[in-house]
């Protein structure tokens, strides 16, 4: 049984579909209820929906409660929800940067700890945090985004070490450019600046990699996976 955040589109939706294809029961969450309900109706496996803001401190606890109420258990958490806010230091909206921090890092920490406290006593489970190739790069105007993803990688490693031997596996996946709504907005901005971006990955590529991580035998923990387009220079 898996909980997937940011599941209304893009990578999160693809992960939900991939795990459903593997026969997993699901809880999916995002802010857009209509998208979640459409996803639920198309999956063919038991799926509960929570339309909520992952940055709300109450959401992770509500997700765990919903999983236990509807499925009787919780085995996997995929922290996928994320935002991209960029801009030059003298023009970027500082409040938007703070909001991105709440989604891309604070919410991941809270959800990871809420679920880890449930998973450790049951002696099994997995937490997968979706990072980004941006964690390893330094791009002008993308400093805060990259720093948050780098912090996410460090946090994920520390949590994995803390849970070693418990039966709970923890890992991160860092996708390169992926064809999502976020990528579409970035591509439009790049085109306006005369920059041509490399062909991206499909969201299904990331979903298949997450499934690979989860389907390793219990003694094997994919701690970190970097997946980029063959055409990408990063």
Image: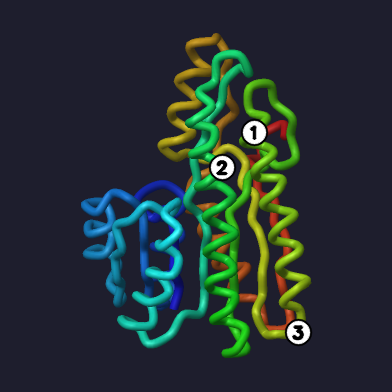
Residue sitting at 31 percent across and 81 percent down?
Answer: 70
- 161 left or right of 34? right
Q: Quadrant of the C terminus?
A: top right
Q: Badge 3: few (under 14), some or many (20 or more) residues near its Cα, within 10 Å?
A: few
Q: Which residue is mark 2?
A: 101
Image spot of residue 67 (x, y percent): 38, 77
**Tag of residue 82:** none
Q: Which residue is mark 1?
A: 144
First in sequence: mark 3 vs mark 1: 1
- 167 left or right of 99? right
First in sequence: mark 1 vs mark 2: 2
* Element type where label 2 sits in the image: helix
Residue sitting at 25 percent across and 63 percent down?
Answer: 42
Q: Nearer the viewer, residue 58 or 232?
A: 58
Image spot of residue 68 (x, y percent): 38, 82
State the separation of the CA atoms marked 3 and 1. Answer: 34 Å
State the separation of the CA atoms marked 1 and 2. Answer: 8 Å
Q: Which residue is mark 3?
A: 165
Q: Which of the colour schemes (rainbow, by chain, secondary structure, one colour) is used? A: rainbow
User: In which quadrant of the rendered view does residue 194 lie?
Assistant: top right
């Amino acid at each position: 049984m898996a909980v997937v955040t940011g599941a209304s589109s893009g990578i999160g939706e693809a992960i939900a579909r991939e795990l459903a294809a593997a026969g997993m029961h699901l809880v999916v969450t995002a802010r857009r209820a209509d998208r979640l309900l459409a996803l639920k109706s198309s999956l063919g496996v038991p799926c509960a929906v929570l339309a909520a803001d992952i940055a709300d401190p109450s959401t992770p606890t509500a997700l765990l409660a919903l999983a236990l109420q509807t499925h009787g258990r919780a085995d996997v958490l995929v922290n996928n929800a994320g935002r991209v806010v960029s801009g030059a230091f003298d023009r970027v909206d500082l409040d938007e940067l703070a909001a991105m921090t709440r989604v891309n890092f604070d919410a991941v920490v809270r959800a990871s700890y809420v679920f880890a406290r449930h998973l450790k006593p049951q002696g099994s489970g997995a937490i997968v945090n979706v990072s980004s190739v941006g964690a390893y790069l330094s791009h002008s105007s993308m400093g805060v985004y990259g720093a948050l993803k780098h912090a996410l990688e460090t946090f994920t490693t520390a949590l994995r070490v803390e849970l070693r031997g418990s039966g709970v596996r923890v890992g991160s996946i860092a996708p390169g450019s992926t064809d999502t709504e976020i990528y579409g907005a970035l591509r439009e901005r790049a085109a306006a600046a005369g920059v041509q971006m490399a062909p991206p990955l499909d969201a299904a590529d990331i979903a298949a990699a997450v499934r690979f991580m989860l389907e390793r035998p219990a003694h094997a923990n994919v701690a970190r996976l970097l997946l980029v387009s063959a055409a990408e220079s990063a």
